[in-house]
Amino acid sequence: MSHAAPGPRTASGRPGTIRLFSDRTHGVARLAVPVVLGLVYGCWAATNARHGGPITGGNVLFGFVTALVFAVLCAALLSVAPKLRREVHAALWGAFSGIAVGFLVNQSGTSVLRSTVLGLVIAACVFVFTFYRYYTHEDAKGHRIE
């Protein structure tokens, strides 16, 4: 007895993709993820900057400004980077990650050399990882396959 092969599920309109959530949920997540990551990053940076001392108004302001900058850059990167070539796309994610980690390490009071080296190591690792992912998810002409 034979059965018909199941057809592709295309809830998103793109063939071959399965989306578990609605378009509205994806739209909310596109805004919520950078905001939540920014708040976590801002809190982490403010905690590192106060060196275990008391929480002050300046420290809270520093945390919110850091969160705002991180969230805006993350949202811009999430919207612009997928339209770029895979090399530039990977380089932007590597630079963003390296700068973010280097800034956090610098706020903890360590030397500039240590934060620079750690930021460069993280940037190189993220670049290699993302380039490999984007390279293996494209066809020969450079179009994304999902």
Image (tube, rainbow, N blue to C red):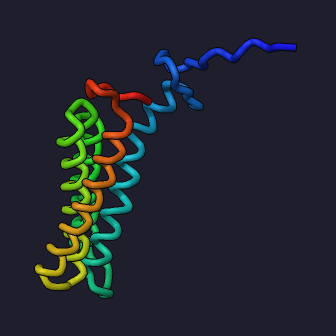
Q: For the point 55% across and 18% down, which residue is it?
A: 10
- Residue furthest to the right in view is 1
Measured from the top left, where is residue 130 in percent x and y?
31, 49
Q: For the point 18% across and 55% down, which residue is it?
A: 95
- Residue furthest to the front in view is 1
Taking depth in this image into account, of 143 and 1 the one nearest to the observer is: 1
Quadrant of the image occupied by residue 39: bottom left
Quadrant of the image occupied by residue 146: top left
Please say if 8 is above or below 74: above
Measured from the top left, where is residue 19 in percent x and y?
55, 28
Q: For the point 26% across and 81% down, which residue is it?
A: 50
Please say if 93 is above or below 75: below
Quadrant of the image occupied by residue 28: top left
Count of numbered labels shown in the rendering: 0
Q: For the point 24% across and 38% down, which residue is it?
A: 86
**In the rendered view, does 9 fall on the left or right side of 133?**
right
Measured from the top left, where is residue 61 in percent x and y?
23, 65
Taking depth in this image into account, of 3 and 85 the one nearest to the observer is: 3
